Image (cartoon, grey):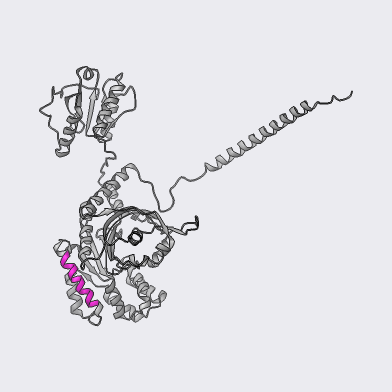
Amino acid sequence: MAEKMLSPEEIEKLRIKEEKKAAAVAANAAKAAAGGDKKKKEKFTLKTPKGTQDYSPEQMTIREELFDTLKTCFKRHGAVTIETPVFELKETLTGKYGEDSKLIYDLQDQGGEICSLRYDLTVPFARYVAMNRIRNIKRYHIARVYRRDNPVMTKGRFREFYQCDFDIAGEYDLMIPDAECIKLICEILDQIKVGNYLIKLNHRRLLDAIFAICGVPEDKFRSICSAVDKLDKSPWDEVRKEMVDVKHLDPAVADKIKTFVEMNGKPFEMLERIRKSGLCDSNQDALAVLKELDTLFGYLRCLGVADKVSFDLSLARGLDYYTGIIYEAVVTDSDRGSIAAGGRYDGLVGMYGSLQVPSVGFSIGIERIFSILEEEALKNKKKIRQNATQAYVVQLDKEGDMEERLKICNDLWNAGINAEFTYRSTPNSRKQFDAARDLQVPIAIMFGSSEIETQALKIKVIETSEEFIIPREGFTDKVKEILKELESKPVLSVPTTTTTTTTDVKTNA
């Protein structure tokens, strides 16, 4: 039997059918492959990158309180704030940090510019001052910085962390801005109660003079300074070994340096000790610096913080841009290292142009301070309030009025009062009160069918369980009065202007 010939229309239909079939097979194969990829993707580890971390609401509460305290202190001294990009041109950062330059995070070339993540907030500030040709400014800046460091999370040492900087840039009389910076560090550390602390202080030019007196070649000043900077973490023998074996310093010169860097003490006592020893008499620059420090210590005595300072010749601060006094604050009953540090850097702004703007400032080690405060909170089992809610609206009747609840909250929000309520349309009153207690909300604003009928609201002070009634109309003014009184008194007395007191009223709570 002869095969039936297919018409052109039938051939076209068959072709389309086969193409659809092939497309379906391909789609199923792709779907299966995607499913396999999905299974593979599910096998990754959920973690933050090394040297970084997430912060819980409880931790953020402590951090925000710290930031608020710092901002208050900065503003008390007349500082304004600025913001700079999180990354800078690499050439902006290069050559400013000495041996620490190896810790700068470089970024991949994007659009023909080689950039790096900012290492600190001081160099970007200097670039900002130079670029805008600012001749004087007192500024603070709170922002994240990045270091390709070996993190020690338990001691507040991260690769991504916040710095809180304060700087005074401008041409001013000798040591006056410097004294204010040290005073401000003391104000901050006293206010946030980190424990006993000490501010170690030295002068970069005095260090250079000491190196010259000891016989250090001038081209080795910075590298030997970097070695001395490690004395707070390493014993003298290790530092000496680095000087001699790694940086090829004459052993006899290293031993002379030891005589100086072992000296520390109260400011005026140290000045007298150095002068009596005659160790610096052969160097005019050293004598000039000692005179400058005499002026500074006098100002610090007037500001009531001289007793918080130790004149310590081992303090070096390895950053290349320092030119004058250098200092760092350490908690004396902790091994966490410095929690604030800074100094004078008169030449940094001038590196970016012809304008020379002398500057001095410091950075607060917020991460280390935060870790101290967090440990204290855990040790004392302190419950941290994570929110700023002032009033919790409680619906007493399970089958109540959701619209009325929303109206009450809306009135509170419009009046600037922080308020919350449950998202259940038929809520349990006990669970609402439990939520208010868990959130540590000062007051509950209660209503049921009877309150709706009488156009009134019940107020309950959560801490004391004290209750009273206020009129529904204009109730937000009364709520503000109650909250204000609660802030000033540990226990709230029932206002005399209330209508019927309800201490004997039974509720579902």
Up-down relation of residue 280 to residue 97 (above or below): below
Most foreground residue, 235 or 164: 164
Residue name at image x 22 percent, y 54 percent: 78
**Which quadrant does the C terminus fall into?**
top left
Most foreground residue, 314 or 343: 343
Magenta stretch: includes residue 292: yes
Up-down relation of residue 339 to residue 1 (above or below): below
Most foreground residue, 322 or 214: 322
Residue name at image x 17 percent, y 75 percent: 272
Q: Position of residue 236 (x, y in %)?
A: 32, 72
Instruction: Name, please, the residue furthest toward the left.
Output: 496
Q: Position of residue 62 (x, y in %)?
A: 28, 46
**Which quadrant does the N terminus fall into?**
top right
Task: Give the main secondary structure of the magenta stretch.
Answer: helix
In magenta, the rendered stretch is 286-299
Instruction: Name, please, the residue furthest toward the right.
Output: 1
Displayed quadrant of residue 200 = bottom left
Instruction: Name, please, the residue furthest toward the bottom.
Output: 282
Residue name at image x 11 percent, y 27 percent: 497
Magenta stretch: includes residue 338: no
Q: Relative to 451, is 230 on the left or the right? A: right
Q: Position of residue 501 (x, y in %)?
A: 13, 23
Displayed quadrant of residue 362 = bottom left
Q: Position of residue 345 (x, y in %)?
A: 30, 66
Could one spot residue 476 in this view of the protein? yes
Could one spot residue 234 in this view of the protein? no
Most foreground residue, 410 or 375: 410
